[in-house]
């Protein structure tokens, strides 16, 4: 590897040089979506964060097996152990098969992620397809004495585990205090302590999603699925486990405890967590009315939005912050992101128009390693973008004639944008639509609208109205703006 990647490991709370367990092969697991509702902003950030890591690891020469699961069972309405299964509930309310609900929202998730230019993982296993293995792992934990059966359900014994191991090693919670305060549980509860978590739950009669097990007809707890699917596809020890910071405790802490008991190993070398997103300064939540679905961003239908925002704008906006920082969404911030991204894309498109000079009057060569240094430093995408803005400044100066560039440097700038903006950050111009026929079509529409501008300036209202009316009739929506015009196909 010519590039030395350093990543922040949540386990050690330090930046560490990334060294995979097996030569140039990397195993990477990321907690995927629970598929019972429309994909929203909260889904976009982990998907994009680990997409950058997936792209970069491959770019610097690793062979990556990226596993991202689909949670389609065992995620309950209230917390890990109580309430109705979220998918079962949706199925009951909409009179569908649970698997219809799962398929419908898995499709929506894929559609939204494709629009955001998030690459599909290497393997996308679902929890419901691995119930047998979850039963097996639960049995192993029972056999080793770190779980107990209670009324057909099986719970992990956190207090016992914590005597010989460290429950809280990842989240650094004071577990003694947690155990102490959770001693108060009334005797009616199946669990011995509040901190204990379910490995298997006996299903209530109305619960639709159920499987046979040695303990009851029921369903697996939420945490066990990730222990099973990660080790099944990546081995008992693997390199990277990622997810949102909201999963750090208890979900990831529970995974470590389960793996340690079942395999004798902690399993994960590097834990990585992306930070959360707020909307206008407040946490996102259904009850807050600020829960914006991705589709609502793309078509501008949410009441907090002033217009539609392209998926690329959302992606760019997220990448403007380091993944471990909070991101706050607001329409002002989205506007700035849109303008900034346009500047970069225009520069990228304009490299071909730079006049070639004998030699350069500005230094270009150093930029590439600066871009690598930014990504090597725990995927610092905002710093990488600042270097691409420096490249943009050089391109614009060369086009304006205030700087000169050699053929070699122009090629270098073109390649810099191709590698870092397009391939690694995944920012594309109109992505799916950017084929040559679309470009020709776009040019033709712009030409007509420019003719209309000219007609308006000449007070030739007949021509200006005719162009507008004919385009509208053909299915275009045209808007006059301060700087000219905007159009889209309605
Ligand atoms: Zn998980």
Image (cartoon, grey):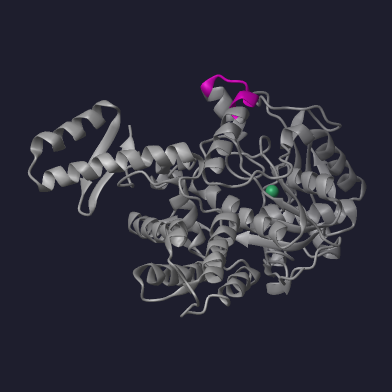
Magenta span of residues: 94-101
Query: Residue 80 lies in what quarter of the image?
Result: top right
Query: Which residue corresponds to the image point at 74% horizontal and 54% vertical from the top-left?
Result: 28
Query: Residue 422 lies in what quarter of the image?
Result: bottom right
Residue 474: where, in percent of width, then height? 29, 27
In this rendering, is residue 46 above or below 132? below
Q: Residue furthest right?
A: 143
Query: Which residue corresponds to the image point at 22% horizontal and 29% vertical from the top-left?
Result: 470
In this rendering, is residue 338 above or below 188? below
Query: Which residue corresponds to the image point at 73% horizontal and 33% vertical from the top-left?
Result: 128
Task: Look at the image and say whether residue 428 sits in the magenta stretch.
Answer: no
Instruction: Look at the image and tell me in which quarter the C terminus lies.
Output: top left
In the foreground, 411 or 30: 411
In the foreground, 14 or 419: 419
Magenta stretch secondary structure, dominant: helix
Residue 121: where, in percent of width, then height? 69, 45
Task: Look at the image and say whether residue 99 sits in the magenta stretch.
Answer: yes
In this rendering, is residue 92 above or below 161? above
Query: Residue 68 lies in what quarter of the image?
Result: top right
Q: Residue furthest front?
A: 358
Residue 282 in view: no
In the foreground, 215 or 373: 373
Q: In this view, does 439 lie to the left or right of 7?
A: left
Residue 473: where, in percent of width, then height? 25, 26
Residue 460 in view: yes
Instruction: Look at the image and tell me in which quarter the N terminus lies.
Output: bottom right
Q: Is residue 235 left or right of residue 348?
A: right
Residue 447: where, in percent of width, then height? 28, 42
Q: Which residue lies furthest to the left in this view?
A: 459
Q: Is residue 443 left or right of residue 315?
A: left
């Amino acid at each position: 590897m010519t590039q030395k990647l350093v990543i922040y490991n949540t386990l050690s709370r330090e930046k560490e040089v990334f060294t995979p367990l097996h030569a140039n092969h990397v195993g990477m697991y990321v907690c995927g979506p629970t598929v019972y509702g429309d994909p929203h902003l909260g889904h976009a950030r982990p998907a994009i964060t680990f997409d950058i890591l997936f792209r970069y690891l491959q770019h610097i020469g690793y062979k990556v097996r990226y596993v991202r699961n689909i949670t389609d069972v065992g995620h309950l309405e209230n917390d890990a152990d109580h309430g109705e299964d979220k998918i079962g509930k949706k199925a009951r309310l909409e009179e569908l098969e649970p698997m219809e609900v799962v398929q419908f929202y898995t499709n929506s998730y894929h559609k939204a992620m494709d629009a955001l230019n998030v690459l599909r993982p290497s393997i996308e296993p679902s929890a419901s397809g691995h119930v047998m293995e979850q039963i097996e792992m639960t049995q192993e934990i029972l056999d080793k004495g770190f779980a107990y059966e209670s009324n057909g359900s099986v719970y992990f014994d956190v207090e016992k585990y914590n005597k010989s191991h460290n429950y809280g090693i990842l989240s650094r919670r004071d577990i003694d205090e947690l155990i102490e305060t959770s001693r108060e549980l009334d005797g009616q509860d199946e669990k011995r302590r509040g901190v204990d978590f379910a490995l298997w739950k006996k299903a209530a009669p109305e619960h639709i999603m159920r499987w046979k097990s040695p303990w009851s007809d029921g369903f697996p707890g939420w945490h066990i699925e990730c222990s099973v699917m990660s080790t099944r596809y990546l081995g008992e020890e693997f390199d990277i486990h990622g997810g949102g910071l909201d999963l750090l405790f208890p979900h990831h802490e529970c995974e470590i405890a389960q793996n340690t008991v079942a395999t004798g190993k902690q399993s994960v070398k590097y834990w990585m967590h992306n930070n959360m997103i707020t909307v206008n300064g407040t946490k996102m939540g259904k009850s807050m009315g600020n829960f914006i679905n991705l589709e609502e961003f793309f078509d501008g239908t949410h009441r907090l939005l002033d217009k539609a925002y392209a998926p690329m704008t959302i992606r760019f906006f997220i990448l403007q912050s380091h993944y471990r920082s909070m991101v706050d969404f607001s329409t002002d911030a989205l506007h700035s992101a849109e303008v900034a991204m346009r500047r970069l894309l225009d520069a990228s498109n304009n490299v071909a128009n730079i006049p070639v000079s004998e030699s350069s009057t500005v230094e270009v060569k150093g930029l590439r390693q600066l871009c690598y240094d930014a990504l090597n430093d725990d995927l610092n995408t905002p710093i990488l973008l600042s270097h691409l803005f420096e490249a943009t400044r050089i391109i614009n100066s060369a086009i304006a004639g205030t700087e000169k560039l050699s053929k070699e440097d122009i090629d270098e700038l073109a390649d810099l944008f191709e590698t870092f903006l397009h391939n690694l950050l995944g920012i594309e111009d109109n992505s799916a639509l950017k084929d040559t026929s679309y470009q020709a079509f776009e040019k033709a529409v712009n030409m007509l609208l420019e003719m209309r501008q000219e007609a308006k300036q000449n007070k030739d209202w007949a021509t200006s109205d005719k162009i507008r009316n004919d385009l509208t009739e053909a299915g275009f929506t045209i808007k006059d703006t301060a700087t000219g015009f905007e159009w889209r196909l309605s």
